C-alpha cells in the first residue's frame, strides 16, 4: 500500500506538470492564432481598401466617359467637316480651333504616322511608326472610317490622366487625334489619387512593405510599374516574379500570390487584377494590376516575441513548479516519516518495523537463513526520570538510540516500541550464537557512560532474543518471546537471555 501511495504521488506530480504544459501550450497556440488572424485581417483591410479605391476611381471616370466620348466625337467631326471644306491642313489656325475646343489638344497625323500639326508643341514631329504594336493600331485607325475613343488612361510621359480619340479624314490621308487631360476639365478628380491612398495604407499598416500598380499591355502582355512622380511614369524594370504575377493576374482574372526572399528577408506577394480590359486588344487599352508586398518579418518578429515570452513564462513556472514539487515531496516525506518513525528518537515505530521485518522474513525464507528479534529494555530508567526529570530522560533516550543505531549494520532494523523499550531485527544470521554475539557487543557499547548536560550517566541494558523461524513464525510471537526472554534476564540479574 505504501509503495502504491508513493507511485501515485509521482503520477499526480507528472499529471500536474502535463496539465501545466498543456495550459501554457494552449495559451501560446491561442496567442499565435490571434496574431496570425490579426495580420490576415490587416491584409484583408489593405486589399479591400486599395481595390475599392481603384474601382472607385474607375467608376468615377466611367461617369464622364460617355460625356467625353460624345464631346470628342462632335469636335472630331467638326474638324473633319473643316477638312472637307479646306484640305490645306498646314494653313489651318489650330490655336483658334483649340479656343473652341476648350481643354483639348489637337493632333494631325499623316500616312507616315507622324504628327505634322499639333497644339502641343512638345509632341510635334512625334513618329508613331516607331511605337511597335501601337503603330499598327494607329495605322488601322487611319485607314478606317469610324470614330474611336480610348479609355481614360495614364500618360506614361506626363503622368496625367488623359483620354484620346481618333477620326480619319474621308480620303484617309490624315488621322485627327484629340486629347484631353481629364483633371483639367474635372479638377475634383485630382483628389482621386490611388498613389496617395497606397502611401497612407503603407504607413498605417507595418506589415505592408509596398503597394504598387502595374500596367500590362494588351498585345505581348509586357509589364511595367507605374510611378507617381518620376518620369517616365511607366518603369519597365520589373522583377521576373512580379512580372509573372502581374501577367497571370490579367490572363486569369484571379489573384496571384508568391513567397520570395530579397536581401535575406522574406516577403509575400499578392497581385490583384483591377482594371482589366475585355475590349478588342487592338484598341490598345492597358490592363492594370495592384501588387502588394507584405513584409513577413513583421508577423514573424511578433510571433518570436511572444514565443520568447512564452519560453520565459515556461521557465519561471517550471522553477516555481519544481520548487512547489520539492516542497510538496518534502512535506509528504516528512509526514510519511512522522507516521512511520518515533518522534523523539527518529527510529522506526512499530508500524514501520512490521513492514521492515517482512523484507527480512522474505530474504530469510529465500536464502534459507535465520533472523533474530532482540527486545531491549533500559535498566532503572524510571529512576533517571524521577531524579533528573522527563526532559533529561528524553535526552537519555535520544543518546541511547543514537549509540545503538551507530553500532549496527545498515540492513539491521531498530525500532522504539514505546517508553524505554526498543526492538532490533537482525537479518541473515547463521545461528543463535551469532545473534547472541551481536547483541552482547551492542550491550557492551553502553559500558561507557552517557554525557548529557554535563552529567555522566551510567546506563545498562537488558535484552531477550528469539530466533526466526525456530521461536515463532510471525513477528508478534517473536516479539512476545523476546520480551519474555528479556524479562527472564532481568529476573536472573543478567543482561541477556535467549528464548
Image (spheres, helix red, strand yellow):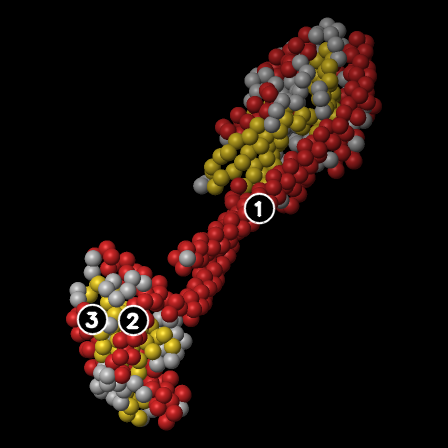
For marks 3 and 2, give the CA distance: 15 Å
For marks 1 and 3, give the CA distance: 69 Å
> The C terminus lies in which quarter of the figure?
bottom left
User: Residue 174, relative to residue 462: is it above or below?
Assistant: above
**Of circles 2 and 1, which is in front?**
2
Return the x and y of residue 456 as percentages of the image width and height: 28, 92
For marks 2 and 1, give the CA distance: 70 Å
At horizontal 62% and vertical 29% (from top left) the residue drawn is: 272
User: Label 2: few (<14), some or many (≥20) within 10 Å?
Assistant: many
Foreground: 480 or 428?
480
* Secondary element at tag 1: helix
At horizontal 59% and vertical 24% (from top left) the residue drawn is: 249
Camera sees residue 390? yes
At horizontal 57% and vertical 20% (from top left) the residue drawn is: 221
Label 3 belongs to which residue?
435
Label 1 belongs to which residue?
30
Camera sees residue 195? no
Return the x and y of residue 101 as percentages of the image width and height: 81, 23
Return the x and y of residue 445 as percentages of the image width and height: 22, 81
> The N terminus lies in which quarter of the figure?
bottom left
Foreground: 453 or 286?
453
Label 2 belongs to which residue?
481
Q: Earlier in the sequence, mark 3 or mark 2?
A: 3
Foreground: 55 or 172?
55
Q: Give left or right: position of 128 versus 243.
A: right
User: Residue 281, relative to residue 427: is it above or below?
Assistant: above
Q: Give left or right: position of 187 versus 112.
A: right
Q: Earlier in the sequence, mark 2 or mark 1?
A: 1
**Of circles 3 and 2, which is in front?**
2
Could you say which quadrant of the image residue 442 lies in?
bottom left
User: Label 1: few (<14), some or many (≥20) within 10 Å?
Assistant: few
Amino acid at each position: 500500500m505504501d509503495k502504491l501511495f508513493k507511485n501515485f504521488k509521482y503520477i499526480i506530480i507528472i499529471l500536474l506538470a502535463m496539465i501545466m504544459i498543456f495550459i501554457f501550450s494552449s495559451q501560446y497556440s491561442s496567442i499565435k492564432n490571434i496574431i496570425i488572424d490579426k495580420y490576415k485581417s490587416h491584409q484583408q483591410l489593405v486589399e479591400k481598401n486599395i481595390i475599392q479605391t481603384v474601382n472607385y476611381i474607375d467608376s468615377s471616370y466611367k461617369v464622364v466617359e460617355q460625356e467625353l466620348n460624345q464631346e470628342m466625337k462632335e469636335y472630331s467631326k467638326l474638324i473633319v467637316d473643316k477638312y472637307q471644306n479646306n484640305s490645306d491642313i498646314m494653313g489651318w489656325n489650330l490655336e483658334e480651333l483649340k479656343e473652341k475646343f476648350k481643354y483639348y489638344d489637337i493632333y494631325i497625323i499623316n500616312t507616315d504616322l507622324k504628327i505634322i500639326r499639333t497644339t502641343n508643341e512638345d509632341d510635334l514631329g512625334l513618329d508613331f511608326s516607331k511605337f511597335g504594336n501601337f503603330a499598327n493600331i494607329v495605322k488601322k485607325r487611319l485607314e478606317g472610317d469610324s470614330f474611336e475613343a480610348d479609355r481614360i488612361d495614364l500618360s506614361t510621359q506626363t503622368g496625367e490622366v488623359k483620354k484620346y480619340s481618333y477620326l480619319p479624314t474621308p480620303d484617309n490621308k490624315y488621322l485627327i487625334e484629340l486629347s484631353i487631360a481629364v483633371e483639367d476639365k474635372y479638377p475634383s478628380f485630382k483628389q482621386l489619387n490611388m498613389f496617395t491612398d497606397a502611401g497612407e495604407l503603407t504607413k498605417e499598416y507595418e506589415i505592408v512593405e509596398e503597394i504598387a500598380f502595374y500596367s500590362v499591355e494588351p498585345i505581348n502582355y509586357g509589364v511595367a510599374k507605374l510611378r507617381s512622380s518620376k518620369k517616365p511614369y511607366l518603369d519597365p524594370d520589373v522583377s521576373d516574379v512580379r512580372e509573372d504575377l502581374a501577367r497571370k493576374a490579367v490572363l486569369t482574372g484571379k489573384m496571384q500570390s508568391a513567397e520570395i526572399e530579397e536581401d535575406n528577408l522574406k516577403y509575400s506577394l499578392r497581385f490583384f487584377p483591377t482594371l482589366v480590359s475585355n475590349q478588342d486588344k487592338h484598341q490598345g487599352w492597358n490592363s492594370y494590376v495592384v501588387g502588394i508586398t507584405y513584409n513577413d518579418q513583421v508577423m514573424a518578429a511578433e510571433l518570436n516575441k511572444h514565443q520568447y515570452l512564452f519560453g520565459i513564462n515556461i521557465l519561471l513556472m517550471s522553477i516555481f513548479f519544481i520548487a512547489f514539487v520539492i516542497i510538496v515531496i518534502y512535506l509528504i516525506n516528512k509526514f510519511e516519516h512522522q507516521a512511520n518513525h518515533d518522534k523523539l528518537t527518529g527510529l522506526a515505530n512499530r508500524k514501520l518495523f512490521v513492514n521492515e521485518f517482512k523484507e527480512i522474513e522474505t530474504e530469510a525464507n529465500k536464502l534459507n537463513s535465520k533472523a533474530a528479534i532482540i527486545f531491549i529494555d533500559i535498566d532503572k530508567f524510571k529512576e533517571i526520570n524521577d531524579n533528573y526529570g522527563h526532559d533529561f530522560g528524553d535526552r537519555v533516550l535520544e543518546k541511547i538510540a543514537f549509540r545503538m543505531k551507530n553500532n549496527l549494520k545498515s540492513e539491521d532494523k531498530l525500532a522504539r516500541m514505546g517508553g524505554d523499550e526498543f526492538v532490533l531485527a537482525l537479518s541473515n544470521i547463521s545461528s543463535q550464537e551469532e545473534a547472541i554475539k551481536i547483541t552482547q557487543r551492542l550491550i557492551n557499547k553502553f559500558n561507557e557512560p552517557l554525557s548529557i548536560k554535563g552529567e555522566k550517566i551510567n546506563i545498562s541494558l537488558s535484552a531477550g532474543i528469539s530466533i526466526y523461524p525456530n521461536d515463532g513464525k510471525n513477528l508478534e510471537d517473536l516479539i512476545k518471546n523476546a520480551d519474555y526472554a528479556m524479562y527472564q534476564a532481568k529476573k536472573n540479574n543478567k543482561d541477556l537471555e535467549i528464548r
